Image (cartoon, rainbow, N blue to C red):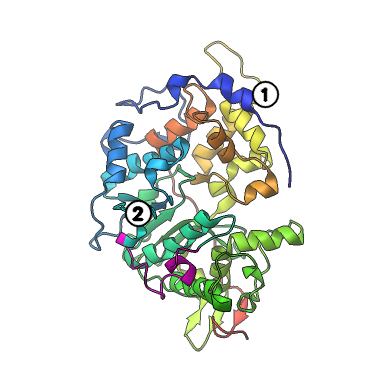
Amino acid sequence: MSTVQDPVQISENAIPASSKEAEVPAASSSDYPIPAGCHAIPANELDLRSDAEIDLELVNPKPISTDTLKNLFFFWHSGYESMHPYTKRNVRAHYRRMAKHGWTVYVINRAEGSPLNIANFVDVTDPALFPKAFLDGRVGGEFAPQHTSDLVRWPLLMKYGGIYTDVGQLQIGDLNRLWDETLGNPDSPYDIISYNLGPADHRDLANYFYASRPNNPLFARAHNLLLALWNSDGGKTSTEGMHASPLLKGPKLIGQRFPEAIRKKLTDYIIQGYCLTLTMGLIDDEDGWDGPTYCAKHIYAIDYMVGSQLIQQYTNWNGTEAFRLMSLALPKAGEEENADHKKAREIVEGCLVRSFGFKLAHGYILQVVGETLGSLWRKHDGSDNVPGTYAHWLREAMIYWTQDELPERLDFQVIEPYKRGPLLREN
């Protein structure tokens, strides 16, 4: 576990109290430069009402309907109202760009009495959807909220279709256009959109972003495997040790560059993604399932590093450095750009042109790499939204601009299977 110096001095100096709840203006008067490859979104395609008005919509969304698949799901266990300010800005940015294209945003929770409680969307008493620990309210362990979130996203998508994304996801590219040209197009061969954590011959979809139509056959099978792990040995209350299940023989543990102890814990932490990986590489003749062929034909996979983690390439996974650079103020008129300004500008321009989104890292990854940009934005309230900084440039661009082109799809080919035989039995 690496440690980093707390950069509190940066944020305290950088954040005026008045900036912490800055409202989005009625129209963009930004002096930030739009990089080549991006363009301004027409104002009539954006919802530029105040933060308070957007928040009211988010806690009182229209009833969900099967008449449309344009459902955008987030999850925060205690509800939108209790989310950290920087993640609220992430969700609002999605809303501002998506609502006028027919999308409804749902921040699902487990808060008693909330209209957005997961129980109002799917049957939480159904053992075919949820494991015993969820039914009994006993999901525990160090990362119980994250694993509760894992357990709700596939049931939501299988029933309603749409997009599930984490509250830590910053959307940059044109998500509505990508949907309309793939899953929203009945002539498209694609059933799923996600990021792939590795090259085109690797199968590991990022569980922080899934898009699908209802009743997706890959997600349905992977969820059944996930339920089997949770219900094994009389019912587990955490994911600890799940990596060792005999049902998961085949794929390598997640995080091959790390020591074995970290690989095991990382796989337990992302056990949902590991179940999906095995199912993608499964040939089950009894069930008529050919995962390698299905994935080659029907998944629109985006490279995760460029597509959703590009800042890490610029900073070598150094969250303190990313935070320092993004907290810098842009040079004023007549000031010369120094080396730090140049690097921060390259990060912002690189993300705006090359990345479809950016996933802020939290959870177990902090024990592996130390502080991240996301953890430091959480720790230093408002540091992501100070006008005149590189972070604010990125924030404003996520609302007002989008990319000229859609992200390239990785060229998935049919791979050798990870496992042959029944999904829920050992070979």
Q: Which residues are magenta?
A: 120-138
- Amino acid type, callout 1: Ala
Nearer to the camera, 402 or 163: 163
Q: Is residue 386 shown above or below 202?
A: above
Q: Position of residue 208 (x, y in %)?
A: 50, 54
Q: Residue at x 61, y 79 (%)?
A: 419
Q: Is residue 52 shown above or below 267?
A: above
Nearer to the camera, 18 or 126: 126
The image quarter containing residue 118 is bottom left
Near mark 1 (Cα within 10 A), the count class, few <14, some 14-19 or many ≥20, is few
Going from N to C along the chain, the mark reached first, 2 or 1, is 2
Q: Label 1: which residue?
A: 339
The image quarter containing residue 96 is top left
Q: Is residue 7 shown above or below 118?
A: above
Q: Is residue 290 left or right of residue 160?
A: right
- Amino acid type, callout 2: Glu
Q: Position of residue 368 (x, y in %)?
A: 69, 49
Nearer to the camera, 59 or 171: 59
